[in-house]
Image (spheres, rainbow, N blue to C red):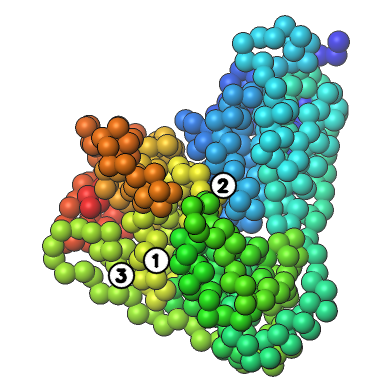
Amino acid sequence: MPRHTPDTLNGAETLVATLVQSGVEVCFANPGTSEMHFVSALDRIPGMRPVLCLFEGVCSGAADGYARMTGKPACTLLHLGPGFANSMANLHNARKSQSPVVNIVGDHATAHERYDAPLTSNIMGITESISHWVRRPRSPRTVATDAALAVQAARMAPGQVATLVLPADTAWLPAERPAPALPALPPSPVAPDAIIAAAQALESGKKTAILMRGAALHGPGLHAAGRIAAQTGATLFCDTFTQRLRSGAGSPAVERLPYRGKDVLARLDRFEQLLLVGAEPPVSFFAYPGQESWLTPPHCAILTLAHPSEDGDAALDALADALSAPAQGSPAPLAPPELPPSGLLTAEAVMRTVAALLPDEAILTDEGITSALPYANLLATAAPHDYLPLTGGSIGDILPVSTGAAVAAPDRKTVCLEGDGSAMYTLQALWTQARENLDVVTIIYANRSYAVLNQELRLVQAQSGGQNALSLLDLHNPSIDWVKLAQGLGVEAASVSTTTAFADALTSALRQKGPRLIEAVI
């Protein structure tokens, strides 16, 4: 059998070199024995930044946040089937974000498979369940080509999860050379007929809602959408849990659809037509007894300007020109809300204070759910920022997303709004923030409960009021001490319970570099 010598590259080295040549610059890693040759290759192949995460769900969530801010994939490094399984909840969110992600999953050497060792699993079945693209090379000679294909698959519009399962022997055996980067596959152009149909619909005088998703919410298409709204009186919307929204002063007003299905139906009831740009028609997050799951009112016609795989930015720009829309829309003014009056801290007061103090070009990540959603409109006239919420509904995503976003944009302040229950899923992200000295301010809404589930218990008509049921939704006995948890993971922290103390703590955190945590007791 050929041996790897200092003058030859092994499979792992060709893999890392190919990833770097394909534009993958960051690896969020939680490696094990099967991945040691990849780890070693990072010292010999320049251009890849390794970021250690203490849980695989942090790796996948960080890759999601990085992709949302850069539009390009990072890679994760995961250990066999169980390691990949630990990453799956936040890969689900990344999939719903349409984020390009490349997973490298080590596996047993091919000759070792037949022994059914303790970590042997149905790794292909596990990875295929959440990935758009999966490949398992059988030879070190094909590892590089498969890596290039993985990056190309991840970058396929609007963004995909690609997984390369790497048997350990294909990493340590000699290989030939890295593979060249493959061309990115751009989004498809929108058919001219779709633009003509949309223009005719908007010129009909019917009251129109435009529901957008994807790059159109933070790229040049958002400016074009503002022009269209100014010309036609259409109202701009995005999904409740969209991937990324450019918000605040200077951007056209985009209204987030409400979370509850009945509220979506009520809001859309006044519209006669719904124009989709990279979005799907809205549906209820869950089924509820006696309530609708399909949330477009019967009298509201649905038209599609751009499917998710199509170029929504270019379509909106062409539509604005077809409508002879003005060169500028009506961007939001810079008019942050006033700080709340002195008193006990509330969820509204937290959001009001964040909106008032948010610095220019901040990245605001949000998994506050019941504490944040009702007050998100306060951000509309805050300083210009990018807004990244939870997307796929699998809680525990936003601490990792904040980590990845801060790696992607180190010169911008990241402010993270997080519920105390959700934060417990991936609090290990704080350690990575401390180790990498990432500029993240985390605000924990400490309401000591899974507040959203208290609402769900009533809405699904399962409310009993008994102590057994309520005990599963309550976070007291003992209460979580977020100051001690954060400090134990290397992050400076403070706990506050009044509006004045919160404003002081946030002001101090925003003035400093590096990770900080504020426990907001509400």
Q: Give the residue type at disc 3.
A: Ala
Label 2: how many Cα within 10 Å (few below 14, some 14–19, many 20+): many
Q: Which residue: 20% across, 58% down?
A: 345
Q: Nearer the viewer, mark 1 or mark 3?
A: 1
Residue 438 as seen in the image, left or right of residue 91: left
Q: Nearer the viewer, mark 2 or mark 3?
A: 2
Instruction: Report x, y in % for residue 483.
Output: 25, 40
**Residue reaching furthest to the top:** 115
The residue singled out by tag 2 in the image is 93
Instruction: Report x, y in % for residue 104.
Output: 67, 33
Q: Which residue: 85% across, 14% down?
A: 2
Which badge, 1 or 2, is on the more N-terminal residue?
Answer: 2
Q: Give the residue type at disc 2.
A: Asn
Instruction: Report x, y in % for residue 150.
Output: 76, 41
Q: Give the residue type at disc 1.
A: Ala
Residue 356 bears which disc, if any?
Answer: 3
